[in-house]
Each structure stands twice: as structure tokens, then as C-alpha cells.
Amino acid sequence: MAKQTNISLRGDVIYSVYVRSHTPEGTFRALIPDLDRIRALGTDIIWLMPIHPIGVKGKKGSLGCPYANRDYRAVNPEYGTMEDFKALVEEIHRRGMKCIIDVVYNHTSPDSVLTQEHPEFGEVWL
């Protein structure tokens, strides 16, 4: 745990959610109705698996890997809009829970915004 992390969080319960497979719809909005059940389990923090757009270049399978992130400043359009994401976070907070997002900065897609804006980064990754 990071030094600046509040020590009271050590006892909190974290519930991991992969939006794509959590509901039949696989969207931010479809997750909202399940928040009361998740809270009733004793959950304090919802940990969302990657929510960013998945890269297309070199994509594995038909769905791709959520860790092959194309843009850290956007949400996967298959899950909904940024407004949908904000609504989900608001509902999580309304129930007294916190929300964290799984972000791995050394996992990105070859067609990510970063490699387009900074081609020199791609030289390091290849």
C-alpha cells in the first residue's frame, strides 16, 4: 500500500467488475442496477477492470485484450459514453462505495494515441 494511502482502507472489501461480462449488455448503465446487491455483500470499493478503448492493430481474437489500451483518456464505446461512465461512478458513490480503475501503463496497443502522437515511444516498445 502506498505511504500516502489512508490506513483505514486496509480493511475495505474490494469487488472486481469486468464491465464486458458482468451483465448480458456489458455496459456501464447495465451495471448500475446491480450496485445494491454488490454493496449488500459488504463491498466498499468497486474495482473496474480496464474500461478504455481496445486497440485494433494486432488485436487478439474478435474482442481483443482490454489491456491493449488505445486511449487512456476515453472509455470503450462498447461499454457506453463518458457520461454513462460518470453516471456509474456517481451511483457507486451514492451508495457509499469508492471506485478504482485497473490501469496498466506499460500495456498499450500498437495503435494507441500515445504511439500516434509520439512515434518515438513505439521504437522503445517494438
Image: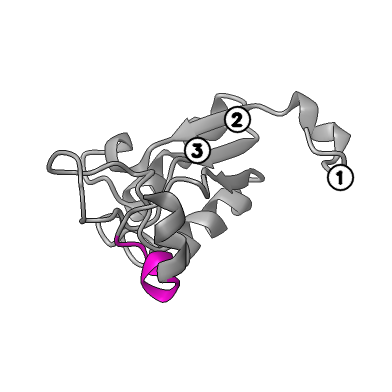
Q: Is residue 76 above or below residue 11?
A: below
Q: What residue would you read off at disc 3?
A: 36
Q: What secondary structure characterizes most of the magenta part?
A: helix
Q: Is residue 57 above or below residue 102?
A: below
Q: Earlier in the sequence, mark 3 or mark 1?
A: 1
Name the secondary structure under disc 1: loop
Closer to us: mark 2 or mark 3?
2
Give the magenta range: 111-118
Q: Nearer the viewer, residue 45 or 60?
A: 60
Asked if marks 2 and 3 touch (Cβ < 8 Å), the reply is: no
Q: Are there few (<14), some (14-19), or many (20+) residues within 10 Å of tag 3?
A: few
Report, in whole angstroms, how far the alpha carbon at label 2 lies from the one at label 1. 19 Å
Q: What residue would you read off at disc 2?
A: 14
Q: Give the quadrant of residue 18.
A: top left
Q: Is residue 11 above or below residue 7?
A: above
Which residue shows up at 85% across the image and 40% down it? 6
Q: Earlier in the sequence, mark 2 or mark 3?
A: 2
Q: What residue would you read off at disc 1?
A: 4
**Which amino acid type is shown beneath numbered disc 1?**
Gln
Which residue shows up at 62% across the image and 26% down it? 42
Q: Nearer the viewer, residue 92 or 80?
A: 80
Q: Nearer the viewer, residue 102 or 29?
A: 102
Q: Are there few (<14), some (14-19), or many (20+) residues within 10 Å of tag 1?
A: few
Q: Are there few (<14), some (14-19), or many (20+) residues within 10 Å of tag 2?
A: some
Closer to us: mark 2 or mark 1?
1
Name the secondary structure under disc 3: helix
**Which amino acid type is shown beneath numbered disc 3?**
Asp
- The single residue placed furthest to the left in the displayed view is 62
